[in-house]
Image: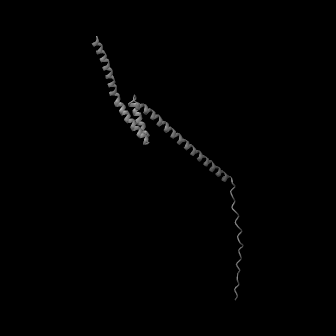
Amino acid sequence: MRVRTLLIVTAIVSMAIGAVVLYLVLTVPNDLQAAALMKTARRQIADGENDRARASLSRIVQQYPRTDAAAAATVALSSLEDNERRKLVANLNALRAASDAQQKQIAALGQRVDEIAARPIPQPAPPPPAPAKKKPVRRRHRR
């Protein structure tokens, strides 16, 4: 009976160890690959290559969904989107301010044009009277 119990316990422990080894064999390479991709994505973000970084992060999330790198990639993707949205809002506000300033300039110029158009057209000054011409004096010739 002792041998039988010992065999059963040994079989259970062997199965547990086998399961752990199998889990590690299957997951450790994924974790390493995902971590390498995450490192690449961080470098791309630092270099300002946001489009390439977004592609790398999406690849991590799609190919290695159950890794720590996938969770970090999800957070990085959301912060990238948030930063880009903030930049777009800032650019939009700057463009709106510039547009408002241009509209004010256009309105001021239109008002000046209206003022100039409303003025009466100045009449040209009458020409000064022509100086009286002296009649040429005819000389009589003496003979």
From the viewer's side, name the closer residue of 80 and 136: 80
Picture quarter with the C terminus: bottom right
Q: Position of residue 40 (x, y in %)?
A: 39, 38
Q: Position of residue 106 (x, y in %)?
A: 61, 48
Name the image colouring. Answer: one colour
Query: Would you say 115 lies left or right of 52 here?
Result: right
Query: Looking at the image, is 94 positioned above or below residue 1?
Result: below
From the viewer's side, name the closer residue of 13 and 39: 13
Picture quarter with the N terminus: top left
* Identity of the residue drawn at 31% across and 16% down: 9
Q: Position of residue 92 (x, y in %)?
A: 54, 41
Residue furthest out toward the bottom: 143
Residue furthest out toward the left: 3
* Identity of the residue drawn at 41% across and 35% down: 57
* Identity of the residue drawn at 44% across and 32% down: 74
From the viewer's side, name the closer residue of 115 and 65: 65
Residue furthest out toward the front: 2
Q: Position of residue 79 (x, y in %)?
A: 47, 35
Residue 70 found in image quarter: top left
* Identity of the residue drawn at 34% across and 27% down: 24
In this rendering, the count of numbered labels is: 0
Query: Looking at the image, is 85 positioned above or below residue 134?
Result: above
Query: Would you say 141 lies left or right of 87 here?
Result: right
Residue 139 found in image quarter: bottom right
Query: Looking at the image, is 3 positioned above or below residue 75?
Result: above
Residue 61 visible here:
no
Residue 31 visible here:
yes
Residue furthest out toward the top: 1
